[in-house]
Image (cartoon, rainbow, N blue to C red):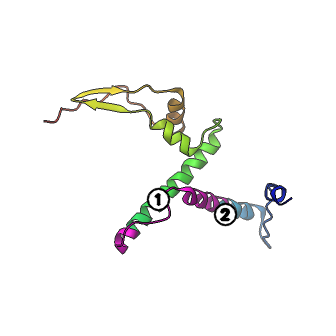
């Protein structure tokens, strides 16, 4: 019975003297905070700062906060896209398969799969038609 109650999907928000749009805006803000908390909680290295320096710890916390906000924004974009089976985690893994390898001035691209093309178009990333030429370093 407890499992059934937890999975019922009902949420009650008591908001006296508020119109519908304000209540829904409050609900969206609450939902975004819940999503951000879930991402931060499930982050593998989110438990420790691994530093004794307070300034460095604040800097790392700022970077984690910014990364969290980027993840939430990406999650909203992915959710609104309607692409079946796409999450932020598997999107980053899929996009990470596309690489440009530079070997002594020769640049070669890995294959750009259908999933990578979908991800690029979802976020408006243009694939360069021509790879920039770089001078080989000595």
Which region of the structure is painted magenta?
A: 30-57
Residue plotted at (69% across, 64% down): 26
Residue 30 is marked as 2
Comparing 3 with 16, the one in front is 3
Write the residue at 50% across / 42% down. Answer: 92
Query: x%, y% of residue 108?
Result: 32, 26
Q: Is residue 67 left or right of residue 1?
A: left
Q: Position of residue 87 (x, y in %)?
A: 59, 43
Q: Which mark is residue 66?
A: 1
Instruction: Confirm whether residue 124 shows in the render.
Output: no
Question: Is the C-beta separation of discs 1 and 2 under 8 Å?
Answer: no
Which residue occupies the extreme left position in the image? 138
Q: In terms of secondary structure, where does tag 2 sit?
A: helix
Residue 11 lies in magenta, yes or no? no
Quadrant location of the C terminus in the rendered image: top left
Instruction: Please tell me whether the stretch drawn in magenta is mainly helix, strand or loop.
Output: helix
The residue under the point 83% across, 60% down is 2
Gap in Å between the C-alphas at discs 1 and 2? 18 Å
Q: Earlier in the sequence, mark 1 or mark 2?
A: 2
- Vertical relation: 110 (above or below) 29: above
Crowd band around label 2 with a 10 angstrom C-alpha radius: few (<14), some (14–19), many (20+): few
The residue lying toward the viewer, choosing from 132 and 109, is: 109
Q: Quadrant of residue 89?
A: top right
Coordinates of residue 38 in the picture (x, y in percent):
61, 58
Indicate yes or no whether the magenta region holds residue 53.
yes
Quarter location, residue 23: bottom right
Indicate the quadrant containing the N terminus: top left, top right, bottom left or bottom right.
bottom right
Q: Is residue 116 visible?
A: yes
Q: Is residue 86 left or right of residue 51?
A: right
The 10 Å Cα crowd at callout 1, few under 14, some 14 to 19, many 20 or more, is few
């Amino acid at each position: 019975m407890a499992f059934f109650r937890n999975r019922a999907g009902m949420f009650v928000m008591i908001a006296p003297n508020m119109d519908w749009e304000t209540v829904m805006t409050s609900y969206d803000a609450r939902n975004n905070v819940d999503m951000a908390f879930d991402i931060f909680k499930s982050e593998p290295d989110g438990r420790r700062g691994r530093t004794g320096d307070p300034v460095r710890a604040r800097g790392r916390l700022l970077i984690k906060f910014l990364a969290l906000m980027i993840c939430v924004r990406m999650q909203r974009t992915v959710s609104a896209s309607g692409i079946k089976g796409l999450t932020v985690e598997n999107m980053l893994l899929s996009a990470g398969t596309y690489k440009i390898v530079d070997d002594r001035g020769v640049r070669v691209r890995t294959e750009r799969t259908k999933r990578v093309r979908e991800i690029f178009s979802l976020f408006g990333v243009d694939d360069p038609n021509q790879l920039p030429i770089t001078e080989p370093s000595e």
